[in-house]
Structure formats: C-alpha cells, structure tokens
Image (tube, helix red, strand yellow):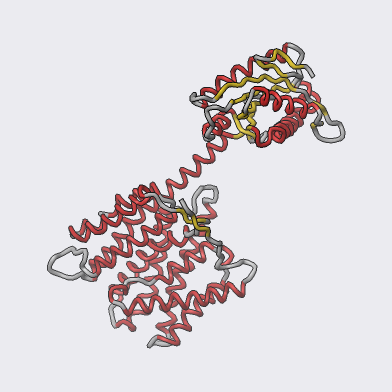
C-alpha cells in the first residue's frame, strides 16, 4: 500500500504579527468575495461562509485574539463593501459588517473559554457546547444584521431576522467543527474497500432521500454519518458532515428533495430546514468527538497498565502484550529471565525509600541498555525484573544473561559521592517458540525462570541458574 508524504504548512505564525495581519486582511477579502459571488447564484445564495471560517481561525490560533487583529478583519469587510457594494461605506454597511464581527468575536471567545475550562478533557472540541455557542452567536448577529438589512433589502425586520439567524446558525454548525479539527495527514495511504463502505453508504442514503422525498428524507443520511463517526477520524467525520449538510440544503432549496409535490420551497420551510439539518448533523460530530475522547482515554489507561512509570520499563502485562505484537518464527527460541536485586532492603535502609526508588530507576535503565535491541525489560515486582529475548540457541540466551549480570555488578548506582554496587540473582528458562500461543509460553517460562532465580538466591546469590546449568558463580 503506497503512501504520499505531505509537507506541513502554517498559515499564521505567532512571531510575525505583521504577516498575520496581512494574511487576515487578505483572507477576509477573499471570503467576502466568495460570499458575494455565492449570492449571485440562486442555488448557492444560502451560504455566507466568512463568519464561521474566521471564527474558527480565531479560535484555533489563540494568539490572534487581539483587538487589532479583529480590527483588521473588520476593516477588510468595510473596504470590500466600499469598493464593490451599492451602499458603499454608509451606515448600513457599518451595521451589517458589525454584525459579522460580533458573530466572529462572540463565537471565537466562547470556544476559547470552553477550551480553557475543559483543558483536561481529551479531544479538540466539545460538540454539544459548540452547538449552543453557534446558536447564541447567530442570535446576536441576526439581531444586528437584520436591522442593517431592512433598508437594503426593502424587507421587514422579522423575515430578515429569521433569514440571518437560520443562515448563520446552520453554516456555523456545519463549518466550524471542520475548521477546528482540520489537519493534514503526514502521509496519504491507499484505502481498502472496507474503509470506504461508510462513505459509500452516506452517498447512497443522500441519493435515496432524493428518490423518496418528503420531510423525513433529510434524516436518511444520519445512520451512515453515525457509522462514519465510529469508523473514521474526527476531522474526516466533520468534513463529511459539512459536505452532507451543504448538499441537503441545496437539494431542499431546489426542490430535488421535495416536501410538497405541488409547491416550491417557501421561506419559512427553508428556515425550518436549515435549523433541522443543523440540529441533526451535530449528532455525528458529538459521536465522533466522544469516540475520540474514549480512544484517547483507553490509550492512556493502556499506557498506565503496560508501563511502570517509576522505572520507565514495561510492566508484566505490557511485556506480554509487546510479545504478542511480535511475529516470532516457529524455529526461534524464547528466553525469559527473572532478575532479583540481592539485599535490596539494605539499600532502602541506607538511602531511604526515595533513594531506593532512584536506584531502582537507574538499575532498570542500565538493564535496558545492556539488553538493547536483543530483548525487552519489564518490572514484575518490587525489585524483581524480567527480560524476554528471542535467541537462536540456549547458549546465546545464557550469554545475554551473563552480560546483564556482569554489567550490573560493575556499574555504580545511587546519587551523590557515595555510590553503591549491586549484584543480582537470575533465573533463566528457554523454549522453542513453535506454534504455541506466545502469552501462554511466556507465562510458563516466567514461572520456571522464577523458580531458577530462587535457586540462585539459595546457592549464594550473584549468579545465574537454569535447568541445563545448575549454577554459574562469578
């Protein structure tokens, strides 16, 4: 399966405020131009992406939340209107563009506040809170924008308020999660067909909605989107949700998904449809963000279970799981060693428990360096450790054990000017991998090696015991 690497690109840089201001000004002009062009096409006149995109940018790049950056954004709106619109830079332009900046500032600040408040929670967004924030920001924006639009559009206040609110709210709910989670993968890998099934189901469900029609047909994509939320990463789910919402609003507005066979979409129906689609499509985002949070917590719990954080080596269960991930040839041998530090109680008595913990950490790292790429190290008890290594012969396993024993004996441990020297007693057991389950084989060898370690303790310590070699004294 081939992959394509992608170079990282940063649109804004904290250390270059002038550059950031120019990028903001240019981006605002481009988005204003895009929104104006969409207004000219009847099928696309339902979208004003500027506010949601800019709110997402201010929420993602925390250092942009300065009054002068918001002023740059507002100035770009006024400049564009002054150069292109029929009302120029008059009071209507000031009021309409002020409503835009109100939406951007309020929504960005609410998202940033929520991030600070829930900083300990995994995941980039809280989708349910985001839904409420979009609702509140859209209400404020609509109240101000409708006042400015009354004279411009020659319409009454209430229809303008409904149109502004439904457009701002639905567009924000669709775009903002996508902007907040947008990431470029480090590499593009080929997809297997099974991975495409949720996306194909989504396309088919939209097509089925067009074929069946009726008010309920706009909910047909929801099961497929939930499937996408469970199977795909959060950024991809947000992208698919955004594309689905845009598609459905366009289909309804053009009567391709029809609520009534005899009449085109009425303004109040479009208002209801926008709100309904936004309310429905936040659900897969909530599911996807919850799945990502759960996966993050599971990884953290697995890390805690698989590693001993004091000594920074595997735990017993972690070593077993690591062995399961290895593809071990059947003709290889698995060697398991159990190491126990001789007289470690005297170390604790001399250095205290904190000093003893420090010695344990140093010891574990020393053993890991001695083992290197030949095997893996785990802590299985207080001062008891295990080493698992794949070897070609019993003699090779014994030589590795002797290397560890001698390396520990010759290495000083501890802090300060009074280092201590340690010795270890080791038990060793080796068996052919064959076709046995690796975890069962590991557990059997670990028990046998532990018995050999006890023999090493009983016969003088600082030695290695194994079934074919009763003892090895230094």
Single out the residue that lies furthest toward the right: 417
The one nearer the camera, 34 or 215, is: 34
Quadrant into which the C terminus falls = top right
Please tell me in which quadrant of the rendered image residue 149 appears: bottom left
The one nearer the camera, 163 or 207, is: 207
| In the displayed structure image, the side of residue 80 where residue 219 appears, left or right | left
Residue 58 horizontal/vertical position (percent): 52, 66
Residue 441 horizontal/vertical position (percent): 53, 23
Residue 472 horizontal/vertical position (percent): 75, 17
Residue located at (37% from left, 71% from top): 142
The one nearer the camera, 47 or 67, is: 47
Q: Is residue 305 visible?
A: no
| In the displayed structure image, the side of residue 355 where residue 57 appears, left or right | left
User: Measured along the vertical axis of the image, is residue 117 above or below residue 167?
Assistant: above
Single out the residue that lies furthest toward the left: 262
| In the displayed structure image, the side of residue 36 where residue 314 appears, left or right | right
Please tell me in which quadrant of the rendered image residue 171 appears: bottom left
Residue located at (65% from left, 20% from top): 428
Residue 127 horizontal/vertical position (percent): 42, 54
């Amino acid at each position: 399966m081939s992959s394509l690497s992608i170079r990282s690109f940063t649109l804004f840089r904290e250390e270059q405020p002038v550059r950031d201001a120019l990028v903001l000004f240019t981006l605002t002009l481009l988005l204003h131009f895009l929104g104006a062009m969409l207004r000219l096409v009847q099928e696309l006149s339902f979208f004003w992406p500027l506010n949601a995109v800019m709110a997402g940018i201010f929420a993602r790049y925390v250092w942009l939340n300065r009054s002068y950056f918001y002023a740059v954004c507002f100035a770009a709106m006024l400049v564009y209107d002054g150069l292109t619109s029929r009302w120029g830079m008059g009071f209507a332009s000031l009021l309409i563009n002020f409503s835009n900046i109100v939406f951007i500032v309020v929504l960005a600040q609410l998202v940033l506040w929520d991030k600070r408040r829930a900083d300990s929670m995994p995941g980039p967004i809280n989708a349910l809170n985001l839904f409420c924030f979009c609702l509140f920001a859209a209400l404020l924006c609509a109240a101000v924008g409708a006042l400015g639009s009354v004279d411009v559009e020659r319409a009454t206040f209430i229809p303008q308020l409904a149109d502004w609110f439904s457009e701002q709210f639905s567009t924000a709910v669709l775009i903002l999660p996508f902007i907040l989670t947008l990431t470029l993968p480090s590499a593009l890998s080929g997809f297997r067909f099974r991975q495409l099934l949720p996306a194909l189901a989504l396309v088919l469900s939209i097509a089925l909605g067009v074929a069946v029609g009726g008010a309920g047909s706009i909910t047909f994509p929801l099961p497929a989107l939930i499937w996408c939320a469970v199977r795909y990463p959060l950024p991809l789910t947000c992208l698919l949700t955004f594309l689905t919402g845009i598609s459905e609003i366009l289909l309804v507005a053009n009567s391709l998904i029809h609520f009534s066979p005899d009449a085109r979409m009425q303004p109040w129906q479009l208002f209801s449809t926008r709100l309904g689609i936004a309310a429905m499509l936040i659900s897969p985002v909530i599911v996807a963000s919850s799945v990502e949070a759960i996966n993050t917590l599971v990884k953290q719990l697995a890390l805690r279970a698989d590693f001993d954080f004091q000594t920074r080596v595997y735990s017993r269960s972690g070593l077993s799981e690591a062995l399961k991930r290895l593809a071990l040839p059947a003709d290889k041998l698995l060697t398991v060693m159990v190491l126990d530090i001789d007289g470690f109680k005297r170390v604790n008595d001399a250095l205290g428990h904190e000093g003893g913990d420090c010695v344990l950490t140093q010891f574990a790292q020393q053993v890991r360096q001695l083992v290197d790429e030949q095997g893996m190290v785990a802590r299985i008890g207080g001062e008891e450790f295990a080493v698992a290594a794949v070897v070609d012969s019993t003699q090779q396993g014994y030589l590795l054990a002797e290397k560890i024993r001698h390396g520990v004996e010759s290495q000083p441990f501890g802090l300060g000017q009074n280092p201590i020297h340690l010795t270890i007693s080791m038990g060793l057991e080796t068996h052919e991998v064959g076709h046995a389950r690796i975890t069962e084989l590991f557990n059997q060898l670990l028990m046998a090696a532990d018995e050999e370690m006890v023999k090493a303790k009983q016969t003088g310590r600082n030695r290695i015991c194994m079934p074919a070699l009763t003892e090895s004294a230094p």
